[in-house]
Image (cartoon, rainbow, N blue to C red):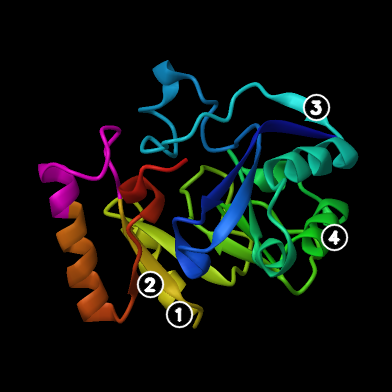
Amino acid sequence: MYRVKSIFGPTVQGEGLHAGMPCVFLRLAGCNAWDGRPETRAASACPYCDTDFRGGENLDWPAIAARFDALLTGIEGRAARSYGCVLTGGEPLLQADTALFQQLAWRFAWVDIETNGTRVCPPRPANVSISCSPKAIRGAPIEVEPDWWKILIPDQESFLDRALASGKPVFLQPTCPDSGPSGGVYDANVKLCLDLCYARGCRMSVQLHKYLGVE
C-alpha cells in the first residue's frame, strides 16, 4: 500500500534525460525536506518547492495500475509501449520499494525516480533511473548514486562540484518563481545557469512542461 497524492497524464517529462518524452506521473505523498505547509516553506530545506504533496489516498498496486490504464485508454501499440513513468513526490523514496519498481518497470518503457538523494534507493530494474535534485537537509546527507543530477541554480549550486565529480550527466535548472518561467529573477537564474554550463560543461534544463503549459 502506498500513500499517493496524484496520478496524472498523458503529459511529457519536463526535465532531465527523458525531457520531452510522453509519460504519466505517479506522485507519492510526503517529504523529508518540507512538511508542505505554506507557513513553514521559507524555513524548509526546499523553499523553492513548486509541488503539492500533502494528503493523498492509500492505494495498492492494482488500484494504481487501474488508474494508469484509464489514463492511457485509446493509446495502443508502439505508442503505448514507448511511454515512461515519472515516480516523484514529495520524496518518493520514503515509500517506494523494489516491488513498486518492478511493477512500473514491467508496465513502462522507462521510469524516472525524482529524489532529493537523502534516502537509500532499494534495488531496481535496469530501466528504472534515479534523477537526484539534492537538498541540504540537516542530518540527512546525500545517500544515492544517481544516474544523473538536476541542480537548481542558484539554490543548489553548492552541490555542483560533487555532481561533476561523479562523472554522471549534470543538468542545471534555473530556479523558477511561483509565477512561472519569466521575470527578472528568472532571467538572472537562466543567465547564471548558462554561464555555468559554458564554464563547467553541464547540460541546460528549463522545465519544458512549464513552457508548454502542461502539468
Cβ–Cβ under 8 Å for marks 2 and 3 = no
Relative to the observer, which residue lies in front, 139 or 51?
51
- Residue 59 is drawn in which quadrant? top right
Give whichever of 141, 184 is nearer the camera: 184
Earlier-in-chain disc, 2 versus 3: 3
Q: Which residue is the site of mark 1?
A: 165
Q: Is residue 69 above or below residue 82?
A: above
- Label 1 residue SS: helix
- Front residue (pair 158, 92): 92
Spatial CA span between label 2 and label 3: 39 Å
Q: Which residue is mark 3?
A: 58
Q: CA gap, disc 3 to disc 4?
A: 19 Å
C-alpha distance separating marks 2 and 1? 6 Å
Reading the image, the residue beneath label 4 is 102
Q: Which mark is residue 161?
A: 2
**What range of the chain is rendered magenta?**
175-188
